[in-house]
Every structure is written in C-alpha cells, then in structure tokens.
Amino acid sequence: MSESLAVGRAEGWARAQPQARAQPQARAKSGATALDPRRTLQLALAALWLFDGILQYQPSMFTTAFPQMLGDSAQGNPAVVAGPITWSAGLIDHHLALLNAVFATIQVALGLGIAWRPTVKAALAASVAWSLAVWWLGEGLGGVLAGTASLIDGAPGAVILYAVLAVLLWPADRAAEAPFTAARGAGPGLARALWLAVWGSMAVLAVLPAARAPQALSGAISDMASGEPTWLAWLDIHAASALNQHGLAASIVLSAVLAALAASVFLPVRRLRPVLVLALVVAVVLWLAQGLGGVLTGMSTDPNSGPLLALLALSFWPAPRPAEGSPA
Amino acid sequence: MSGMSGPGWLAGIFAALMLTVATYCTGRLVAARAWRRPTELDTDGAHVVMGVAMAGMLVTGLRTFPVSLWAGVFAAGAAWFGYHALRARRAAPATPWRCLQPAPHLVECAAMLFMLLAVPASAAFLALLPAVFLLGWVIRLADRLAVPVPAFAAAPGTPAPAQLMAGGTGTPGRPAGLLAPRCAALCSMAMGITMGYMLITML
C-alpha cells in the first residue's frame, strides 16, 4: 500500500471534514507535510523542466528547423565556441528523430526527478550539467561572446538560469538563519553573487551596441509577433511601435533599472520586498516582450527567461524561519 | 477533431501507454470489487474511457466510437467532477470510493472536450492553459510519491478511509489500504503528460 497517495487522500479526506479542519495541530502531529517555500520553488522549477520537455516533443522539433536553429547560434562566436556548436548541430541533423526524442525525454526526466523527493539532488545536479551543455551547444552562450545578445531573446541565456536556480534551490541548510530562501542551500554570499551576476549581466547586455541601436529593441520585439495569437501579436507590435527610433533611450532606462535591481540585493533584507516586486514586474514585462517565449507558436523549445527571472526573484523573498525537520 | 500532428512513432508510443493505462485501470475496477479494496471508482472509470479515447485520437487505426459519443461521455464526466468539486468546497462528506481531488479530473475532461471538438487555431492559448495545469498536477503527484504516510488526522468519530477499509481484506495488524495508490498516481501522471503533449501539439 502506498504511502503517497494515501497522504493526499488523508489530507483531502481531512479537508472534507469540518471537525478535522478545526484541528490543524492534530494534522501537524500526524506528520502531514506542508510545502515550505523552497520546496514550492523546486516544484515550480520542475514544472518548467517538464514543460520544456513537452515543448521539445512538438512536431516542429522533429524537422530540420531544429538543428538549423542550433547551428545558427554559432554565428559570430569565436571558433573555439562555434566549432562544437556546428558539430553538434550536424550530429543532430543526422539523427534528428532519435536525438530530439532523447533530449525531450531527458528534460521530462529532469522535471519528474526534481519533483520526486528521493531524486531531487541528483536531478538538480544533472540539470546544472544539462543547462551548461545546452547553453553552449544550443544557445551559443546566449550570444554573449558574439555581441548579439538581446534581452528579448533571453540573454544571457534562458537555459543558464535553470542552472542558477538549481544552485539556489539546492536542498541543504548551510546558513543557520538564512535571510531568504535562496541562501539556505547556497549561503547568502553565493546567492547574492549569483543575483548580481544575472541582473548585472543583463544591465550590461542592454546597452551593448547591437542592443542600443535606434531600432534594435523595437525590431526584436516586433519579430516576436510572428506566429503569435492575435492579442499577443497586437501587444508586441504596439510595444515595438512605441519604442521605434527610441532604442537608445529605452536601452539606457532598461539598463539603469536592471543595474539598480542587481545592486539592491545588498540592501537589508527588510527592504528587499519592493525590489523583488520590481523584479517580478520586469520579468513579466520582459516575458510579454518575448512573446511568452514563443510557446504559442509551436516553434519554441522553452518559455524563455521571463518565468525563470520571476522564480529567481521569488527565491530571494524573505522567508520565514524553516520549521524543524521540514523536508527539503 | 483537432489539428494534432507529430511523428507517427511518437504518437504510437503514447497510444500504447494510454491503452496500458486503460487496461490497468479496468483491472483496478475488477480487483477493487473482487478484493473489496477501495479505489477511486470515478477516477479509474474516467481513465479507462480517456485512455481508449486518447489512443484513438493519437492513432487513427485505434479509433472506436464517433467523436460525438466521446464528447457526450466527457461532458458527463466534466459535469460529474464539477459537481464533486463544488461539493468538496462545501466540505460535504467524502467516501474513499470517490475522487477526493476532482478539479484535475474536471480539467482532464474539459481538455478532452477541447481536443475532440473542432477548435479554431486562434484559440491556441486555450490549449496551453489545461496543458500547463495538467503538467503542474503531474509535478504535484510526483512530489507526493515519496511522502511518508501520516497517522490519520480526522476528528474522533469521523470515519477515515482506513477505517472504512477495515471491513476489507487487510492482513492482520495492517488495515486494508487503498488499492495500489502509487500505481494510480503513475497512471494519472502518464495521463497528464500524454494529454499535455496532445494539447501542446495543437498549438
């Protein structure tokens, strides 16, 4: 007999009983476990991996458009970076159906592995390795070395954010009294450094020559409208129209906001909430500008960086002190 | 029916998975009656019909009944799970023979209707909502697969599922439990992933 669903059933049964709802302490004594903030974020990360895996199963991923898209990411990169990208794109082109199915299955397995408690550490570790490999061979290091990185395309690379989140949500408790969830496993120093690296790099990338050109931002956003549902295309086209010829000013403002977000992680924790709300707003706006990562076009491999940035912000939300013996 | 597309061999694998789930859930219904062990009759029943219907949607050769009949079945299923979702919110008495968490199954039935009935391409966004919901449900199920069993936490005098099962065929010292809940959870996960795939291929 299993324990798993018995828990769900017992909880559901107890919820259905008015008397039982009046006895939360009895339920606590019984061992019925509530999700702590870190576990909730781990499950959200798992859901994103699972979603990525399902997207990888889309029909368009079994066509030559997929290896071509991978091969295109080599452009502009140094030879030492571009060589392996071209090689892997060629390999995938030759064994397209098999390798794409394997990739999709790996991502589904990562999602389920993070969601299943006994394998959470192994799956998070594997997700770091997988993310780094995809960041190089699938995203060309996000175009950072090519000088073509664009925040609208997810720079510095949506997939690298999976690795960052895996580190921040690692199920360990190194810091005795962690100021926020991300510091529990990684420690406050490393957590703040990763936050600074992510938002700081975005601030820099926002003002690179390719990104600050007069029509760079509006052009990137309007490109996202292709293949989108009408309402989202309308949104992106109008945003692009408003930014037309104002690329430099928009890039400077965006960069300033991102730099402020990056630096504010060193504020006292009690003052962090407004910053995190701003980070969530930026993530949502960015995701809309990214056309929701193109997930509605049937050509997307992932939902892009918006949801991951939101998850990153939530992992820095000041957390209540973890209950004793709470699970990872 | 929908505009689903994708590699034929992949659809075949998912169809085989769905038929396996349907067969297994049929076995659960038979075993629950033979061994007098509680199981979620409505969930298992829904998985049997969903498994058969989805296999037919994935592989043309496995089609059985006309779309209109399937649509009627899943409309009735949606009404059933919707009704029990409302009852659950009102803290109505539950039994171990009925699903305690009807909302995901309501979404499953709604998604089946969505896929069976002709949906315009502009409604692609609508396909994503149940897909995301179902994938989230799969993740929650996976999370629960390793949680230890707590002692039952209802008020004194409230019949718990385990107590209701006591009249069953449990071994001495161990009350009869719900029928293979881990396997039931795995069936739900397989169903959720397959349905998520089918919905996303409709985008």
Image (cartoon, grey):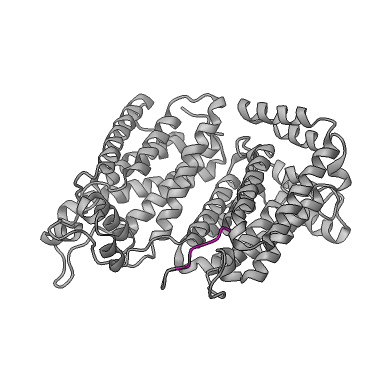
Residue A64 occupies which quadrant of the picture? top right
Residue B66 left/right relative to B30 = right
Q: Position of residue B62 (x, y in %)?
A: 40, 37
Q: Is residue A320 magenta?
A: yes
Q: Is residue A319 visible?
A: yes
Name which residue lies at 56% across and 69% down.
Answer: A178
The answer to whether A315 is drawn above or below residue A239 in the figure is below
Residue B165 within the segment the image draws in magenta: no
Q: Report the number of numbered marks.
A: 0
| Magenta span: chief secondary structure | loop
Q: Residue at x 69, y 58 (%)?
A: A264
Q: Is residue A23 left or right of residue A178?
A: left
Q: Residue at x 42, y 54 (%)?
A: B140
Between A54 and A187, the one lying in front of the other is: A187
Q: Position of residue A32 (x, y in %)?
A: 32, 63
Q: Is residue B96 visible?
A: no
Which is nearer the eye, B114 or A245? Answer: A245
Q: Is residue A292 above or below residue A24?
A: above
- Residue at the extreme left of the image, as rendered: B167
Q: Magenta residues, as a range?
A: A317-322
